[in-house]
Amino acid sequence: MVSILPNNIQIEDDRTGINIETLKRAFLDNLFYIQAKFPKISTKNDYYMALAYTVRDRLLNRWLNTTETYLEKAPRTVAYLSAEFLLGPHLGNNLINLGLYNVVKQAMEDLGLSLTDLLEQEEEPGLGNGGLGRLAACYIDSLATLEIPAIGYGIRYEYGIFDQEIKDGWQVEITDKWLRYGNPWEVARPEAELEVKFGGHTEDFIDEHGRYRVKWIPFKVVKGVPYDTPILGFQTNTANTLRLWKAEATESFDFEAFNKGDYFGAVHEKSESENITKVLYPNDESYEGKQLRLEQQFFFVSCSLQDMIRMMQVQNLTLERFHEHYAIQLNDTHPTIAVAELMRLLLDEHGFDWDKAWNITTKTFAYTNHTLLPEALERWSLNMFGSLFPRHLKIIYEINSRFLDEVRIKFPDDFDRLRRMSIIDESGERYVRMANLACVGSFAINGVAELHSELLKKTTLHDFYEMYPEKFTNVTNGVTPRRFMVLSNPRLANLITSKIGDSWVKNLDDLRKLENFLYDTNFRKEFHKVKQEVKQDLANYIQTSYNITIDPNSLFDIQAKRIHEYKRQHLNALHIITLYNRIKANPNLDVTPRTFLFGGKAAPGYYMAKLIIKLINSIADVVNTDPDMRDRLKVVFLTDYNVKFAQRVYPAADLSEQISTAGKEASGTGNMKFSMNGALTIGTLDGANIEIREAVGEENFFLFGLTAQEVSQKKAAGYNPWDYYNSNPELKLAIDRISSGFFSHGDPNLFKPLVDSLLYRDDYLLLADYQSYIECQDRVSQAYRDREKWVWMSILNVARMGKFSSDRSISDYLKNIWKVPSVKVDVPEYSQSND
Ligand code: F58
């Protein structure tokens, strides 16, 4: 369609034009032709969909040109393999990256709609549990922004992380039907489907060249259908692809040949196949040896590797150079079966000999470890593994046997070392150890913060470090400032830009320039005003959603992350109870008013974590209704904490709780998001906290607690929580209040498992850290009274967060691991139709 606009003679296509009138027309056009609605009968979701398609139209040009550039130039490419991508809503992010946020906002206003309302309408793709999945999402954002040829590969779960409801203080899980109203951001590519084999047996044979070969005769075959989502860079032409695989039944294989006449059997087979990508496992930080999970892992890995090979064939590249064409990052061990699958593809399907295949494989993969917790290390029962993947098990045996020969040569007669390093755990029931396979099969191994990488070398992966010191490196995590500042905190972003320009969005180190304005009273006032306004926004939201009034002038003290004993939400709870007890003992006590906000999901099978949620809600019930607490303490548990909600929460925090037991949190990334929005951190020397403290300055960080080394020493020396309980009256009273039934309507049994775990085990040393935490919180309360000083510290937190941009993390990966150069994408002027 041609339109000649008044005052601005311009020919625009309704699918590409970004003029306000064109946008409005395109929006109404999409409402009519895609949603089949007109304004009078449209729902909010219809409007959201119409807008999403309008925005999608405007990024297709970049996406297709990027794809075409990669196809033609066949550049070295990063393939980021992750079982989770916790993307969060696309619309707002795409508007920011396209630079269309303001004009679209205006266009919607002209039509009597609110962009904020429409953004709220989007069901987020919650295809991840927490930090690990969100990190993958930040990294694909940065890869595109840095113009790196890259593809994200993962699973298109039909149901993402469950929605959380709270009933009577307890968490209840609800299925996340995120695809219910359609997903305007994905494009199905059924023409690019692939087949994945499972089960069966192998047969050896001699091929026509007289070579020994193996054939895998599977028990079942499942189809993988790719669904592609464009991932735009910020203000670049690059739009990379996130390719997520959906499992479908094959028509011919099992149906006709095996199930002739058995209609119900056939339908059952079909649903069995489709089950593979039905649901995301909702466990964080603990691993469960479920067969379906192993099937999920192999399914997406096999699809992705076959896809990469196919792409090279289309580009006429020889597979001899696979490792030169692809750098494949394994996001934790979940995709590690890729080491065996690439070997199988090269050996069995493409006729490579072992040495050549192994050389390619070990130059292709790099492995990121995300946890030191022993219960999170993946290992698969050998029986299960062998019956699902008979060929892979043989390949792993061969890898292991050659590897152990190497170990023997490097460390003669060290039998215990061989036992520890073997890919097969033979200490009892036999297992395949995925971290060992990842270490052997990769050319690089990294932790996600300096401390974590050091501890990996010293503890969990110590033997592998001694074997291959050159493989080990650190890449400290980072987060994208596009989503977690520009989109989530426009007030702050605009203030910053008004002072130092907008270069910081792409070059976060430029935030340093804010330090020049520290002595500018006006700037400090504006900065404080922004924080207050953002807090008011959250207060309004809480008022509407929970009918709880919170005071934006109180200190917003926030802990938002998955609920886990090592993260110690219950230490935070002990502090609240301590303040409560102090006020009860002295109702006239002069306390700094605080609002405690919690958010986070517990793994459905993790009883203790669920009990912690119940405890927080029970404390909230008591505190929020006690008249002595009025205008002093409030406690709110924010239900269903997800990416969308997180974007509201980070900007509104005064204090960020990063209080894990030292040595347990690999990095943390919420800590970065809070701090770049001006929250001060109360934290232990754990994960990236250490680097955040270094960056912002120790005077601008509230430090408490034992160090990782002290924690392990204390445990080794025989830690006894009772010593702390008996010698600290405030601690004793806080715990007694819980066990007496004070927060459970007189029931002393409700929280008994929690209290017992603290008094009899206290694996995470809450009691040992209690006093230090309380004293530190007292310093926080004191500091908040000097608001001038607080604002000063808060500005410094923002100004010094440059290091924690995921752009920096990705640059580290590029420089030290992937060595993939950037590629410019040219987007020709929009073609202009003449009809
Ligand atoms: C997290 N791990 C770490 N795992 O706990 C956190 O410190 C780190 O910042 C983050 O990774 C990114 O590096 C994490 O989120 C999981 O959720 C896994 C999901 C699958 C099962 C095992 C845990």
Image (cartoon, grey):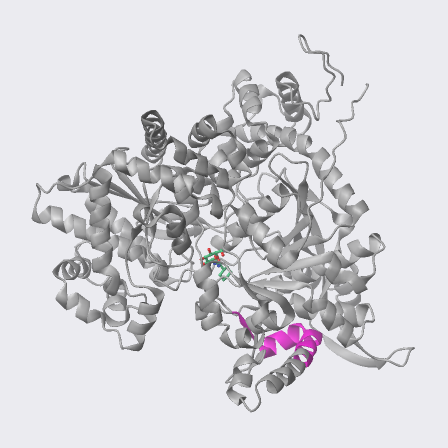
- Is residue 306 among the parts visible in the rendering? no
**Residue found 58% across the figure and 43% down from its top:** 179
What secondary structure do most residues of the magenta stretch adopt?
helix
Looking at the rendering, which quadrant does residue 455 occupy?
bottom left
Q: Residue furthest right?
A: 208
Quadrant showing the C terminus: top right
The image quarter in which residue 704 lies: bottom left
* Closer to us: 413 or 82: 413
**Number of callouts:** 0
Question: What x and y, as percent, mark residue 578?
Answer: 18, 52
**Part of the protein shown in magenta:** 378-398
At 76% from the left edge and 76% from the top edge, which residue is drawn? Answer: 354
Is 699 rendered above or below residue 366?
A: above
Of the 4 image quadrants, the one containing the N terminus is top right
**As drawn, 138 above or below 498:** below
Residue 380 forms part of the magenta stretch: yes
Left or right position of 751 against 487 = left
- The reply to whether the magenta stretch includes residue 114 is no
Residue drawn at (33%, 55%), measured in percent from left and top?
A: 659
- Give the image location of residue 526, x and y in percent: 35, 26
